[in-house]
Amino acid sequence: MAKKKEITARLMRLTWNRFNWERPQGHVWSKSKQGDTAYAYEHQYGFGHEEWLFNLDFNFEGYQYGYIRGVDDMPSDDKVIEKVILFTINNENKARYLVGELRKVEILDDDLDYQDQFEKELNIVIDQLKEVKADYKSAKKEGYWVNVRFKMEDAFLYSDLIRSPFLDKNEKSYRRFKPFKLTADQESELALEAIKSPSFKFNPGEIIFSGSHKRITSQSKKDITRSHSSLTQDLYKYHKNFLKVDPEFLSAEKSTVGDCIVDFAINEKGLVSIFEAKTSSTGLLNFRQALGQLFEYAFLDNGIKIKKLVIVGPVKLKDFENSYLNQIRSVISVRLEYWAYQKNEKDLENRFLIY
């Protein structure tokens, strides 16, 4: 067998997906746009073929099988792409984000049929497309679309999408689903963006919400419930009105680490306290959901000095949960607290029980 030809690194766009390219999210589409190349595929059919790229149901004999639109415009010879840098464009704000890198990506022959190999999975795909009201009939007619395979150990995916100033600055050049060639300098610039640690930016004040609302982060659109917004507002009032902290030191959902919004923060003369609010019904679940975020917020930017980290939840701790909290405290160097939010308490000073 002839040795597969390796080519230089490429930059390729993925359809926007808030589920980590494991299942479709659904897109606004119209049948009248089908066949009109002025519109992206997902706006013609309600989905992009890349939306299952990292779904492990399509992993077979050590290889992950999937689709990347830019690969269709590569030469048709048998080949391997040494490096594919993936990016995506947020449908709402049009910002460009780096997704990750794939190494040693094999481009598959067009005449190979994967319909039988993934017949069961294709049925699941059709059901998922029905759920998001996409044009599942076109997908059913096409069968399973595959044009690449790679090993997951050669996939380097970022835990959060990384905003790319370079791609934003050159938005007209990088907007289509093409296999863009990058110079060494361009690759280096993207690599530097990828390894930069997110910085903590403190913005005093509070955002006033009414009822349920939505906010945009680097990864996705998250529903923020009334209870969550009430909690952060009460944290602000508690510190301002009861503890008499200067409002210039307080920040309710206005500070960020990278593109992530911090629920509540205090910055007193360079000493920062970070609060992460959760709404689960047990202390353990609130620990589990909050700790990773708190550690990232506290330690990704080594330029900030942490006074304390605080988990805030709507329930009091049981004895075993309090013991677990003390165990965690014994193995970390930073001060850690849990605040039970008692929203039905009439008096503000009684609304938080501190552990």
Image: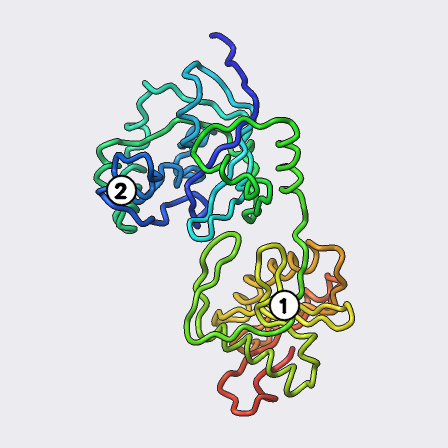
Q: How is the image coloured?
A: rainbow
- Side (left or right) of 329 relative to 41: right
Residue at 38% x, 19% y is 109
Residue at 67% x, 79% y is 247
The residue mark sitting in front, 2 or 1, is: 2
Q: CA distance from mark 2 to mark 1?
A: 44 Å
- Side (left or right) of 238 relative to 20: right
* Residue found at the very far bottom of the displayed protein: 347
Secondary structure category for the residue under label 1: helix
* Residue found at the very far front of the displayed protein: 172
Q: Position of residue 176 (x, y in %)?
A: 43, 35
Q: Position of residue 184 (x, y in %)?
A: 64, 27
Which residue in the protein does label 2 denote?
A: 126
Q: Position of residue 330 (x, y in %)?
A: 73, 65
Q: Is residue 26 above or below residue 189?
A: below
* Residue found at the very far top of the displayed protein: 1
Q: Is residue 23 above or below residue 81?
A: below
Residue at 55% x, 44% y is 168
- Asked where in the image residue 233 lies, by quadrant, the reply is bottom right
Tell which circle, 2 or 1, labels the residue nearer the N-terminal end. Answer: 2
Amino acid type of disc 2?
Ile
Q: Position of residue 202 (x, y in %)?
A: 67, 65
The foreground one among 61 and 162 is 162
The foreground one among 174 and 262 is 174
Quarter holding the C terminus? bottom right
Residue at 51% x, 36% y is 86
Which residue in the protein does label 1 denote?
A: 324
Crowd class of label 1 (few under 14; some 14 to 19; many from 20; radius 10 Å):
some
Amino acid type of disc 1?
Tyr
Q: Is residue 304 above or below residue 134?
A: below
- Asked where in the image residue 289 lies, by quadrant, the reply is bottom right
